[in-house]
Image (cartoon, rainbow, N blue to C red):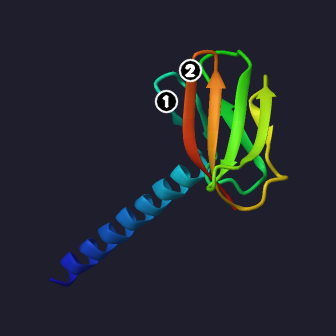
Amino acid sequence: MRKNYFYILTLSLCLFALTASAQDNAKQQPKPQETADGLGFYPNPVSNGKIYITSKTTANKEITIFDVLGKKVLQTSLSARELNISSISPGVYIIKIKEGDASATRKLIIK
């Protein structure tokens, strides 16, 4: 009977270690929130002052960020992937990404 408890305890610890490892890997690899058109950004929430815009094409993108009251906080045209938002105060915002006829609107959290 003691052997059974030992095996159950050992198996439980192994499963716990595997689950914790998988969760750590999921946290380290940010996944962009994309629309059907492929527009998106990551990471969200932002803690390093930069977001990365994802797209299926390399065309210029119009980026607009609004606060929760609808006031425009940032508007820029972007040809690269990286957008510096370190000048924006921590809080909850709405980001609109427009590329040609495609557009995506998402919640953006800045820590």
Residue 101 visible: yes
Secondary element at tag 1: loop
- Residue 66 in the image: x percent, y percent? 67, 47
CB contact under 8 Å: marks 2 and 1 = yes
Q: Quadrant of the C terminus?
A: bottom right
Secondary element at tag 2: strand
Of residue 68 and residue 3, the one placed in the foreground of this image is: 68
First along the sequence among labels 2 and 1: 1
Q: Residue at x 73, y 62 (%)?
A: 90
Farthest-out residue, bottom:
2
Spatial CA distance of label 2 from label 1 is 9 Å
Q: Amino acid at mark 2?
A: Ala
Nearer the observer, disc 2 or disc 1? Answer: 2
> Tag on residue 35?
1
Residue 31 visible: no
Q: Amino acid at mark 1?
A: Thr
Farthest-out residue, left:
1
Q: Which residue is mark 2?
A: 102
Of residue 6 and residue 38, the one placed in the foreground of this image is: 38
Q: Residue at x 56, y 20 (%)?
A: 102
Q: Residue at x 44, y 64 (%)?
A: 17
